[in-house]
Structures are given as structure tokens and as C-alpha cells.
Image (cartoon, helix red, strand yellow):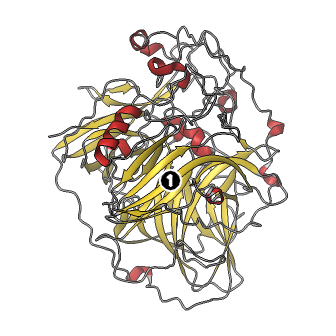
């Protein structure tokens, strides 16, 4: 390995110059097309939608809820019965193996009541040896890089020839997406850690560059020790009641860890921003619920996946899958050999099952939608015919009550819901006037390609109506109990207080990088950055010095200039912001879209637009902002920012 100082001096050649690496890895092998399960062979709507149960806690002590949650490998029937089970990764209570699942059980939190979680990396076999990744890890990216040791971790390793996938122990670190987290509990990408395995190679780093620093901060603040292979985070839960989610955030492999199954809901309830004037549909799952209990508030995680014929997850093992580029790679080019700029699975998976069905009553339901896809934007509708010509006429409307940061100022009636990766939509759907026996379908009219804005059927081709254009089915059955909920149009939502005037405006940029060595080949990476005095983008990489350093308690507007051809969902950690508006050169400012006029933590930045968001920075520390297309986040489209004391 070269020294860290020499590496930093030669930082710009990452992926482009002379590469040196010592670990022996297999050569790249692509999965043949015939090894992929044809989506047409997968029966739809034969499996009941799984409603995630509540994660059991260890106990409640000194006004804190305690959890010990591990990540393990297990097999789950994601595909319908009759097809093979799928090996996945997921979270669960360490003391109860029956609680592990994909998606994970829901953490139910109360406003003002802290939650403390010991997150344990249990990616081990029965003998205590580490498990390699289920999916192909590109070791040429700027990633956690455990083989680099303490001096070479969290960087782009150097190779003399094109390597195969990394096959060593897998780093993880969990992020509570949407939380107002202190830095040591935020799931910082360089605070990862390996499992406490018997066979971790001696030269490997067992934790990321910031793990020890954050461990010391946490132990001094709360007096609880972090152990080998785990980290303890505490969430204050002082935010507005809302739908959050937790998922992995390890540097350079988030796309793979989340795709493998590491995701779950975190629902924060109570406080002054909960309890609208009116009755919402319920109940939601609670601890100790008996089997078969009916729920009228349901979290719904939507993801796209592909599978091999043996039931295992398929994810591309080489760049060829994306654009047919067969090289040259290292040492004659700067194109990563395994990383794909985006990935779109053809099989829709909802709450861990392919194309499930939900039997509903003719009454109102509250659905908390989460787009958990790696790259895919969703345009959701409820229709009568799933194979109808797109765009299809909606059969039922959505009444949106909330978004990423809790309730909106007022309910919004919508025929469709656009959700970028990581965005949430809290909606009511009223089946009250639908005849018993009716079948309705939740469909997706977003594209099977990068999203650029516009309308399905006019500006882009919608998803394949036979596969990725279908999500789940509703079958209306008889009414079991009277519906006493309030009509959504008559609800008065909790008082909404907008942010005050901003004291500073920052300009940042979204950029795409083509190969510096091969003409017309790319992208080789996606990047964030700033703008110079002439308004020209200045792309920056993950390892460049911090350029965004807001003062504690400051309120700022960030102008996000998208110089690429695609839309990007931009997520800013630690804050909930308000969308001010969007503007294209020579045009007037457009106001926020319906459903965007509350608080948000993820915003769609459209091509050629300046997207303005306003936020107040409430906690000092080191955080992240990044694109939530996970393939982009994992290859340079993520930057640290630091909130500094006033």
C-alpha cells in the first residue's frame, strides 16, 4: 500500500493512474443473461402483503428506550411459493432470531422519549467467521476499504490491474434517515465497523476513520461503551411526528447493503405536531398484537429488484451490464470495472414480497409510502386495470397528509404521487364507495430509466406495465367494523410554523464526470460541488476539504444547481428543510410542488434547475449531504459538511 500522504497528493488519479493493491481477489465474472429469472415467470398477487411488526425493545430505563438490533444473513420467501427462497440481510432483535426480516420490524418512538440502539454487525456464519457480501463490491471506488488498514481505509485503493469483487468482511453503519441526530449517532459513512469475526485478516482496519472519535464522544456523553463489532446511537426524538426509516450508510457500499435488505421504518409519534383535529385511520401494529389483527395504518416500502433463477438477488457484476462498455479498465482507463451508474430492477418488491395483495375493507386507510429503490423514481397511482395503456386513468385519489418531515399545513388531494428514492408520502386512501369484490391496483408510471422530470407518456416512457409498472393489488372485502374516521378533506392538521428569514445563501452544484482518458465514455462518477465567482460549477470529491460550514442555529438557503441531464434526490442530514422553489434560467421561480410545502429532508433537483431549500442547523458536528440515488452516493456524489459553533 502507498502511504496516505502520497495517496492524497495523487488523489485526482483515483481510478485513472497506476494502481497498487495486495489482496488477492478473483477476476470479474458477469452473470449471464440466462441466469436471470424472467419476471414474466413470477406469479403476481398470490402473496398477502406483510405488515411489518414492531421491533421489540430490551427495556425502558431512566426515560430511555433500549434496543439491541443486529444485522444477519437469512433466507426469506421474497418470491411467491413454488419459487426458491432468497438469501437476504436484515435487522432484528439480537435476543430473538424470529424477529429478523426484510424489511426490518418498525421502531415505534415517542416524541421527547429518547431511543438508544446498540447496532451489532452479525454478518457471521455459524462458526463465527465473516460472511462475504451477497453482491459484487467494486473495490476501485473511494470506499470503506478495510484491507487498507488504518492508513489506507476510507480511500480509493490503487491497483496495477483490474481486480475482481472484494470478498472480505463487510462494513456497516446505520443511519436514521430524517432524524435530527447528533454527529456520533448519525451513521456517518466513515464510522463503519466490521463484524467481530474470528478470521478478520490481521492487516484489515476493523472500523472507519471516525469510529473511535464518535465512540469517545458517545461514551463521555452517555456513559455506555461501544463493543467490537457494534456501535451505540441515541436518538432524542424531539422532532415533529413523522415517517422516518433506518438503513445502512457505509462508505462506498450503501447501494449493496440496502439492496441486500438493510432497511426498516422508524415512526415517531406524539408531540405538538401530531394529533390533527379529526380521527385518522388506525390501528397500526403494536407490541403484543395477536396474529391476524387487522390494521388500517400500514407502512409500505416499495423497492425494485431482480433475481437469479436460483432465487438469489441479482445485481450487476460488471459495467458491461449498464452500457455495454467492455473496457479497457485499470490500468488503461478511469472507468470503474464493476460499478453501475444506475440500476433498475424489473421485479417490484413491496414490504419484502414480490407483487403482493392487500385485502381491504370499504373504508379509509392510512398508508405511509417509502420509495426504498436504489435509483428508480416512482409515480404511483391506483387504477382499475394494471395493464391499461399508460398513462392510466386513476380510480381513486390519494389524500396526502404528510411528507418527510411530518404533517403538511393542509391535506392535498392528488391523482398520483411522485416519490424519488428516500422520499416518504403519508396518505389516506378511501375505499368507502368501492363495491365489495372490486380489485384495484397500485401501479408505477415512473420510467425504467433515469428520471428527468415531466409527464409519463409525453416526456418519458412509463415503466413496463407487465412488470415494473405494477406494485401491488387491493381486493375490497366486506366491512368488519364501522369507519369512524374523519373525511380527509375535513381534517385540520397541526399548526405549521415556517422557518424565519435566512441569513445566508449558498450555491452548490450537481455534476457528472466523464472519463478523462477515453473520449465519450462515461459517466465515471457523479459529484457534488460549489460554484465559482462566475457561476461555473466546481466539482468536488468526497475527500476534498469541507466547503459547507454553516454556523450553529443559522438559517440558510442552499441553491442547488443541477448541471446534469437527470434529476437527483438530494438528502441533507441533520435537518428538515423547506422547499423555497425552483427556477430555470430566464424563467420565473416555480413554487413547491403539491406535497412539498411542509418540511422535507430529501428534495428532487431537476436538470437545468436551481432548486432552493431553506434550513436551520440545530446541532454542531460533522454531517453529510448527498444524492440518494445510491449508486451515485457510492461513487463521489456525497460530501461532508460541518456545523460549527457560533
Q: Position of residue 200 (x, y in %)?
A: 60, 27
For residue 394, which quarter of the picture?
bottom right
Q: Residues within 10 Å of mark 1 (few under 14, many from 20)?
A: many
Query: How many numbered discs sit on the rendered protein?
Result: 1
Q: Is residue 584 visible?
A: no
Residue 369 in percent (x, y) is at: 52, 62
Q: Is residue 419 visible?
A: yes
Q: Quadrant of residue 360?
A: bottom right
In the foreground, 236 or 521: 236
Q: Is 431 drawn above or below residue 407 in the view shown?
A: below
Which quadrant: the C terminus? Answer: top left
- In the displayed structure, 127 sits above or below 602; it is above
SS category of the residue bearing label 1: strand
Residue 45: where, in percent of width, then height?
74, 66
- Along the horizontal axis of the image, is 443 left or right of 187? right
Q: Which residue is mark 1?
A: 68
Q: Pick whichever, 70 or 468, lies toward us.
A: 70
Is 136 displayed left or right of 559 in the figure? right
Kindly identify the residue that appears in the image at 64 percent across and 28 percent down.
199
Side of 35 relative to 236 (left or right):
right
Residue 390 versus residue 623 in the image, above or below: below
Name of the residue lying farthest toward the bottom: 482
Q: Nearer the viewer, residue 436 or 542?
A: 542
Residue 264 figure quarter: bottom right
Counting from the top left corner in percent of width and height, residue 84 is at 81, 51
The residue lying at 64 percent from left, 50 percent from top is 304
Left or right of 417: which side holds 406?
Answer: left
Amino acid at each position: 500500500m502507498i502511504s496516505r500522504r502520497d495517496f492524497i497528493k495523487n488523489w485526482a488519479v483515483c481510478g485513472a493512474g497506476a494502481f497498487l493493491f495486495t489482496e488477492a481477489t478473483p477476476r470479474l465474472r458477469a452473470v449471464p443473461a440466462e441466469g436471470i429469472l424472467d419476471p414474466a415467470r413470477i406469479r403476481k398477487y398470490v402473496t398477502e402483503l406483510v405488515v411489518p411488526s414492531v421491533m421489540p425493545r430490551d427495556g425502558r430505563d431512566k426515560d430511555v428506550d433500549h434496543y439491541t438490533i443486529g444485522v444477519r444473513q437469512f433466507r426469506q420467501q421474497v418470491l411467491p411459493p413454488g419459487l426458491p427462497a432468497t438469501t437476504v440481510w436484515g435487522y432484528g432483535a439480537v435476543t430473538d432470531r424470529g424477529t429478523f426480516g426484510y424489511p426490518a420490524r418498525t421502531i415505534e418512538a415517542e416524541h421527547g422519549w429518547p431511543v438508544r440502539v446498540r447496532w451489532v454487525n452479525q454478518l457471521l456464519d455459524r462458526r463465527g467467521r465473516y460472511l462475504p457480501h451477497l453482491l459484487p463490491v467494486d473495490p476501485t471506488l473511494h470506499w470503506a476499504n478495510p484491507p487498507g488498514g488504518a492508513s489506507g481505509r476510507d480511500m480509493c485503493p490503487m491497483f496495477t490491474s483490474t481486480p475482481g469483487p472484494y470478498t472480505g468482511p463487510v462494513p456497516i453503519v446505520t443511519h436514521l434517515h430524517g432524524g435530527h441526530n447528533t454527529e456520533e449517532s448519525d451513521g456517518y459513512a466513515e464510522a463503519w465497523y466490521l463484524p467481530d469475526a474470528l478470521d478478520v485478516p490481521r492487516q484489515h482496519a476493523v472500523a472507519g476513520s471516525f469510529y473511535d472519535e464518535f465512540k469517545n464522544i458517545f461514551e463521555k456523553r452517555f456513559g455506555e461503551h461501544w463493543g467490537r463489532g457494534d456501535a451505540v446511537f441515541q436518538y432524542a426524538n424531539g422532532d415533529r411526528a413523522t415517517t422516518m426509516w433506518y438503513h445502512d450508510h457505509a462508505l462506498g457500499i450503501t447501494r449493496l447493503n440496502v439492496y441486500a435488505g438493510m432497511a426498516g421504518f422508524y415512526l415517531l409519534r406524539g408531540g405538538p405536531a401530531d394529533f390533527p383535529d379529526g380521527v385518522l385511520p388506525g390501528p397500526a401494529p403494536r407490541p403484543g398484537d395477536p396474529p391476524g389483527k387487522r390494521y388500517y395504518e400500514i407502512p409500505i416500502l416499495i423497492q425494485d429488484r431482480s433475481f437469479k433463477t436460483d432465487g438469489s438477488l441479482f445485481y450487476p457484476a460488471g459495467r458491461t451490464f449498464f452500457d455495454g462498455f467492455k473496457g479497457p479498465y485499470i490500468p488503461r482507463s478511469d472507468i470503474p470495472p464493476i460499478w453501475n451508474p444506475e440500476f433498475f430492477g424489473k421485479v417490484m418488491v413491496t414490504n419484502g414480497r414480490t407483487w403482493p395483495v392487500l385485502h381491504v375493507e370499504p373504508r379509509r386507510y392510512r398508508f405511509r409510502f417509502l420509495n426504498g429503490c436504489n435509483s428508480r423514481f416512482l409515480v404511483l397511482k391506483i387504477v382499475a386495470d394494471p395493464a391499461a395503456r399508460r398513462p392510466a386513468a386513476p380510480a381513486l385519489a390519494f389524500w396526502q397528509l404528510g411528507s418527510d418531515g411530518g404533517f403538511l399545513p393542509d391535506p392535498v388531494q392528488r391523482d398520483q404521487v411522485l416519490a424519488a428514492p428516500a422520499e416518504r408520502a403519508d396518505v389516506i386512501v378511501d375505499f368507502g364507495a368501492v363495491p365489495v369484490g372490486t380489485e384495484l391496483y397500485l401501479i408505477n408510471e415512473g420510467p425504467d430509466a433515469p428520471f428527468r422530470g415531466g409527464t409519463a407518456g409525453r416526456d418519458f416512457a412509463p415503466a413496463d406495465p407487465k412488470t415494473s409498472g405494477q406494485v401491488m393489488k387491493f381486493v375490497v372485502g366486506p366491512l368488519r367494523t364501522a369507519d369512524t374516521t374523519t373525511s380527509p378533506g375535513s381534517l385540520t392538521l397541526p399548526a405549521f410554523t415556517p422557518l424565519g428569514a435566512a441569513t445566508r445563501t449558498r450555491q452548490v452544484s450537481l455534476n457528472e464526470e466523464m472519463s478523462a482518458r477515453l473520449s465519450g465514455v462515461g459517466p465515471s462518477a457523479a459529484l457534488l460541488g460549489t460554484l465559482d465567482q462566475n457561476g461555473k460549477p466546481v466539482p468536488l470529491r468526497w475527500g476534498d476539504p469541507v466547503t459547507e460550514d454553516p454556523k450553529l442555529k443559522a438559517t440558510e438557503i442552499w441553491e442547488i444547481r443541477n448541471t446534469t441531464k437527470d434529476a437527483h434526490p438530494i438528502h441533507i442530514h441533520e435537518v428538515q428543510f423547506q422547499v423555497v422553489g425552483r427556477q430555470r434560467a430566464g424563467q420565473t421561480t416555480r413554487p413547491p410542488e403539491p406535497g412539498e410545502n411542509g418540511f422535507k429532508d430529501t428534495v428532487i433537483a431537476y436538470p437545468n434547475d436551481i432548486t432552493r431549500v431553506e434550513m436551520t442547523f440545530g446541532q454542531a458536528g460533522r454531517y453529510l449531504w448527498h444524492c440518494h440515488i445510491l449508486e451515485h452516493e457510492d461513487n463521489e456524489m456525497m460530501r461532508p459538511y460541518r456545523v460549527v459553533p457560533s
